[in-house]
Amino acid sequence: MNRQKKSWLLVAFLMSAGMLCQAQDKYFTKTGKISFYSITSLENVEAVNKTAGAILDAKTGSVQFAALMKGFEFKKALMQEHFNENYIESDQYPKAEFRGSIINNADVNYAKDGTYPVKVKGQLTLHGTSKEVEAPGTLQIQGGKVDVSSTFTVLVSDFKISIPSIVKDKINNNVKVVVEAHLDPLKM
């Protein structure tokens, strides 16, 4: 092989390796799980969405989650219908989104298997309203993949979600949210 071909192959290899290294800094999923639960005197409210998208940039600690509201599944069809039509108004506000960052990202060694406690801070947008939230979480690194989990509470009233007066005293304003996702390295 002549010298010029070797040089081009070396350049191509280095560019590919550079892109691969850059891609290894990002992790992604389309199957994140977001569930919520609220204990009420009328009836407990519980739903799960297993189609949340998430991306994590290990270099910067930037994290983003998005979920379609109609993707939340309830045990009772009527409850799901009321959630989408009367409370969350899914046709008008089709998705929930979180954009933020891991505050202590420097404490996470993405190259080493282990479990790392983290704190995430950012904007949660729900029902057309954004609110800053801060939540504890866990990153588990194993074999170059990242599992994320977090549990936190949101107030329905913070997101301008109207509760009909007939059931207002029987619906809890506090909703427990659980986020779990298995993120794979983003391939470019």
Image (cartoon, rainbow, N blue to C red):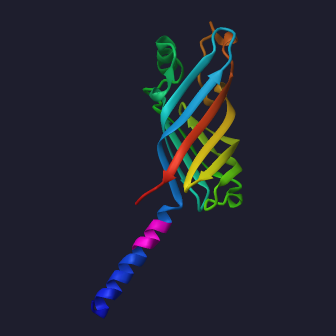
Toward the viewer: 6 or 138?
6
| Rendered location of residue 89, percent (x, y) | 48, 23
**What residue is at 38 percent from the left and 81 percent from the top?**
11
**What residue is at 59 percent from the left and 62 percent from the top?**
59
| Magenta-span inclusion, residue 20 | yes
Left or right: residue 133 versus residue 21 is right
| Magenta-span inclusion, residue 88 | no
Can residue 38 be seen in the rendering of this structure?
A: yes
Quarter of the image for the C terminus: give it: bottom left
Magenta residues (range): 16-21
Toward the viewer: 113 or 188?
113
**What residue is at 54 percent from the left and 35 percent from the top?**
33
Can residue 129 be seen in the rendering of this structure?
A: no
* Mark count: 0
Main SS, magenta region, reads helix
Residue 132, quarter of picture: top right
| Rendered location of residue 46, percent (x, y) | 59, 21
| Rendered location of residue 141, percent (x, y) | 61, 53
Against 54, is 16 above or below? below
Against 33, is 165 above or below? above
